[in-house]
Image (spheres, grey):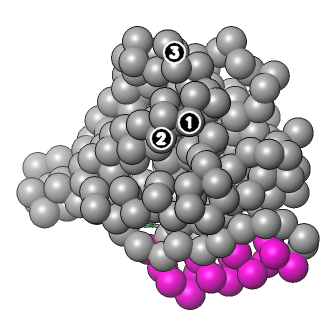
Amino acid sequence: MFQNQTALVTGAGQGIGFAIARQLARQGAAVLLNDSDVELVRTAAETIRQEGGRCLALPGDASDVSFIRKMVAVAVQEFGGLTLLVANAGITIFGDFFEYSPDDFQKVMDLNLRGSFFLTQEAARHMREQKTGGSVLLMSSVVGHQAHPGLAAYSMTKAALEMLAKNLVLDLSPHGITINAIAPGATQTERTLDDPNYIPVWSKITPMGRPATVDDIANAALFLLSPASRHITGQSLIVDGGWTSVSPPPF
Ligand SMILES: NC(=O)c1ccc[n+]([C@@H]2O[C@H](COP(=O)([O-])OP(=O)(O)OC[C@H]3O[C@@H](n4cnc5c(N)ncnc54)[C@H](O)[C@@H]3O)[C@@H](O)[C@H]2O)c1
């Protein structure tokens, strides 16, 4: 499905980003994996290569605009172009609203918003130059739709990313570039393994009876990156096992 496609996936050392990168590589795309954790991203790329995938690891900070430009340049230089972008890297910093610090607020804004915005800008500049079209996927969350305790700052960024996807149809459609967002619900990752209550609690409050796996999210991502969705743009797809239809908090 993705032969002749070249992809850049940020925050791809583990979790959802890794699952998307791996599935893209399994289906023939050449993938540049980024993560701020050097060891993690090198190991992730090695795993994909051992499965026969074509990929490279590029460690670095996906909120740094000069590094963002480098990531796109490396993809173009190493793979001959860039047709798919997954701006997946995002951080969650929980905190009581009354105590939330400017420092934590800035960290969340820098990666989730500034990083995603300028990465989309740089990738789209190249896609426009290439005249091949392309697909951009932004990583939102169900908390961009529903209130969740302790996540005011993070939720703002996710709602904003969905508006970014909607707004950019004006700029990107003339160049054959689609842009969409995925809003995952609770998803089991390496990060959630430490919490013994995560699976039981989310299984109880999710209509489909379990939290998402990273492959549930990657399956939806691959659809939105594939030729099958060429006429879908500016949309957000919630993948949450039905949670936002009822939205009980996890305690
Ligand atoms: N897991 C969930 O339940 C869930 C739900 C909704 C949305 N999301 C979103 O999905 C995306 C991926 O989430 P996840 O749970 O797989 O995350 P994760 O924490 O498991 O993995 C994210 C990766 O991003 C990397 N990273 C952190 N800061 C970075 C930076 N500045 N530059 C580059 N890489 C950086 C981390 O090292 C990590 O490997 C995020 O945008 C997150 O907000 C996750």
Which residue is label 3 attached to?
173
Residue 137: image location, x then y, percent:
56, 37
Note whether 61 is above or below 225 in the view shown: below
Disc assigned to residue 126: 2
| Dots 3, 1 in contact, CB < 8 A | no
Camera-side residue of 92 and 57: 57
Nearest to viewer (mark 3 / mark 1): 1
Q: What stretch is highlighted in magenta?
A: 36-50
Q: Nearer the viewer, mark 2 or mark 3?
A: 2
Q: Residue 130 carries which label?
A: 1
Q: Can residue 17 be seen in this view?
A: no
Closer to the camera in the image, 159 or 250: 159
Q: Are marks 2 and 3 in contact (CB under 8 Å)?
A: no
Residue sitting at x 39%, y 44%: 122
Whether tag 1 and tag 2 are in contact, CB under 8 A, the answer is yes
Quarter in which the N terminus is drawn: top right
Who's the residue at 27% across and 47% down the image? 114
